[in-house]
Amino acid sequence: MFPTRSTDGVDALSVAFLLGAALFGYYLLPLVSLVATQSPAAVVARITSPEVATAAVTSVTAALVSTVLAVCCGVPLAYWLARREGWLQTLVTALVVLPLVLPPVVSGMVLLTVVGPNTLVGRLAAAGGVPLTRSLAGVVLAQTFVASPFVVVTAKAAFESVDRSLEHAARTLGEGRVATFRRVTLPLAWPGVVAGVTLAFARAMGEFGATIMLAYYPRTLPVEIWVSFTTLGLDAAFPVAVVLLCVSVVTLAVLDRLDSNPLV
């Protein structure tokens, strides 16, 4: 084992704890302040209001659908990127990361150029009875665009950390590529994959900019918070924010259970 105390007497572990505690406190205090300043009666009243209840259902439904889409498409893409090298892999990785650095409003503008009501895709979808703007489908499209990169990037790193000699051993024992992935690679990379899923869901639940550009209706909780703030003031928006916080914490706790109880 390596000592944590350096020769000048500074305990590196203590320094790390203090710096980490400062950052953790910076995360925690605003959340505690938000919850502490809201009376339970105000929060319950806002939860039971039809517009907030509908927004909560829309947020959870859309976030779950977008997360499932991100997993179904993002995990295979992450595996491909982890096992490929060269300029194509570099280009694809850069394009995957791009939504993470774009301002969310710009992401919404980009999506409107593809699925907006005046585009070919948008007109065809509307003619088929599935409008891609001002609809649940629009919310899912916006959330998937901004949240799915978390699955790809995190899962890619997890797959890259898997010892490839274990995969080769499974192949020499007669396992096919798909069976090797399912029985060897995915179980070993599972914690990283679940971390990506958790980040993607959390990002989808909190998505605002791209959603408001692509689908103002049906409202999600972030959009409902904005509407409450602009129309009724900060006091009306705070209880809705507490609702979003509670829904997110409960769902993330469920996802965390998947990490300790893998389904693969």
Image (spheres, grey):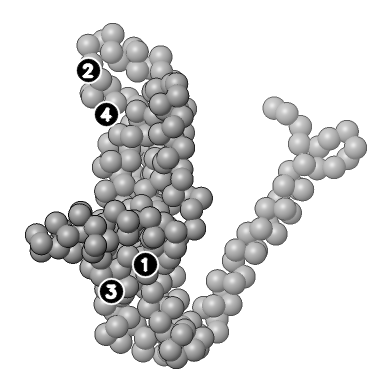
Q: Quadrant of residue 24?
A: bottom right
Rendered location of residue 27, percent (x, y): 60, 63
Answer few, some or many: residues within 10 Å of disc 2's Cα (few below 14, many 20 plus, some between 14 and 19): few
Residue ID at (90%, 37%)? 8
Query: Which SS class for mark 1?
Result: helix
Tag 2: amino acid? Gly
Q: Which residue is mark 2?
A: 176
The CA span between labels 4 and 1 is 39 Å
Marked residue nearer the N-terminal end (3 or 2):
2
Query: Which SS class for mark 2?
Result: loop
Between 243 and 140, which is closer to the camera in this rendering? Answer: 140
Tag 1: amino acid? Met
Marked residue nearer the N-terminal end (4 or 3):
4
Q: Which residue is mark 3?
A: 217
Marked residue nearer the N-terminal end (1 or 2):
2
Answer few, some or many: residues within 10 Å of disc 4's Cα (few below 14, many 20 plus, some between 14 and 19): few
Between 197 and 264, which is closer to the camera in this rendering? Answer: 197
Residue ID at (23%, 23%)? 179
Task: Report the number of discs.
Answer: 4
